[in-house]
């Protein structure tokens, strides 16, 4: 079990730029989740996939955000035209069905 | 998912048992109680979960009251490495239920 892997660990970018994060789930986990965490708060749900199908999206996921999970394996989260308010830790988790979710260590995004 | 209430912070001496309480008075019959913890700069780590029976694993014990309106996470011999934010979450495991709804958790400080 190699755990959930997220890349990059840190991303610094200028406002208005596009960024993309990658998540590699635990192998054979069919569900994959994205969360966002700001300082002092618990993680907030963004979206989740069962295999390649995106089944739920939070209203936090504005139209500047898009997530994909081609072939039901790794997932990418893209933010277009980044804003200051997008600065946060982006966390990925995976699970086998409805079992416990296991998290990666996140990608910390800083917008200059 | 039902809402949970936890103390903001707690202290525990190293080697002593840490007892972290959680109230979930609106929990419904098919909702499980999950505990996660988050050490600084890492993703949340799954600890334990239960429905109505007490549970124990290598990390902790979970005691759920008979009416299921509250629970206690017990770390039997706390160490400095147990210093973290602990989240109590209730979640429906059935069907396509997905997200974890985190609150602000309990910040546990283990001291010498």
Image (spheres, grey):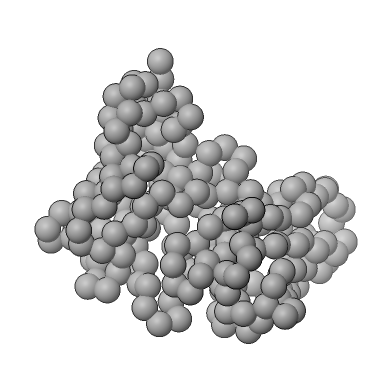
Could you tell me how many numbered marks the image carries?
0
Residue at image point 31% right, 52% down: B5
Q: Is residue B86 left or right of residue A54?
A: left
Going by the picture, which residue comes out furthest to the left?
Answer: B66
B70 is higher (above) or lower (below) than B85: below
For the question of whether residue A60 can be seen, the reply is no
Q: Quadrant of the N terminus of chain A?
A: bottom right
Residue at image point 44% right, 33% down: B82
Residue B47 appears at what percent x and percent y?
41, 49
* Figure quadrant of residue B32: bottom left
Residue B107 appears at what percent x and percent y?
42, 37
Q: Is residue B83 left or right of residue A8?
A: left
Residue at image point 58% right, 79% down: A50
Going by the picture, which residue comes out furthest to the top?
Answer: B112
Of A5 and B24, the residue lying toward us: A5
Q: Is residue A12 left or right of residue A27?
A: right
Residue A88 appears at what percent x and percent y?
67, 52
Residue at image point 25% right, 58% down: B24
Of B56 and B97, the residue lying toward us: B56
B98 is higher (above) or lower (below) than B103: below
Of B60 and B4, the residue lying toward us: B60
A47 is higher (above) or lower (below) than A22: below
For the question of whether residue A96 can be seen, the reply is yes
B35 is higher (above) or lower (below) than A65: above
Of B55 and A11, the residue lying toward us: B55
* Figure quadrant of residue A24: bottom right
Residue A82 appears at what percent x and percent y?
80, 62
């Amino acid at each position: 079990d190699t755990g959930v892997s997220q890349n990059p660990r840190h991303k610094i970018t200028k406002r208005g730029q596009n960024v993309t994060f990658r998540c590699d789930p635990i192998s054979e986990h069919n569900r994959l989740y994205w969360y966002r965490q700001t300082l002092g708060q618990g993680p907030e749900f963004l979206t989740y996939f069962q295999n390649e199908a995106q089944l739920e999206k939070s209203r936090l996921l504005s139209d500047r955000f898009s997530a994909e999970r081609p072939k039901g394996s790794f997932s990418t989260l893209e933010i277009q035209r980044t804003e200051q308010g997008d600065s946060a830790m982006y966390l990925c988790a995976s699970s086998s069905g409805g079992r416990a979710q296991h998290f990666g260590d996140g990608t910390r995004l800083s917008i200059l | 998912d039902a809402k949970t209430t936890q103390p903001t912070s707690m202290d525990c001496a190293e080697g002593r048992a840490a007892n972290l309480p959680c109230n979930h008075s609106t929990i419904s019959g098919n909702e499980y109680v999950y505990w996660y913890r988050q050490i600084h700069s890492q993703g949340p780590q799954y600890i334990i979960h239960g429905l109505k029976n007490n549970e124990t694993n290598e990390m902790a014990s979970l005691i759920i009251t008979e009416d299921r309106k509250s629970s206690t996470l017990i770390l039997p011999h706390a160490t400095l490495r147990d210093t973290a934010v602990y989240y109590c979450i209730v979640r429906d495991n059935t069907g396509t239920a997905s997200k974890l709804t985190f609150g602000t958790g309990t910040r546990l400080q283990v001291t010498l």
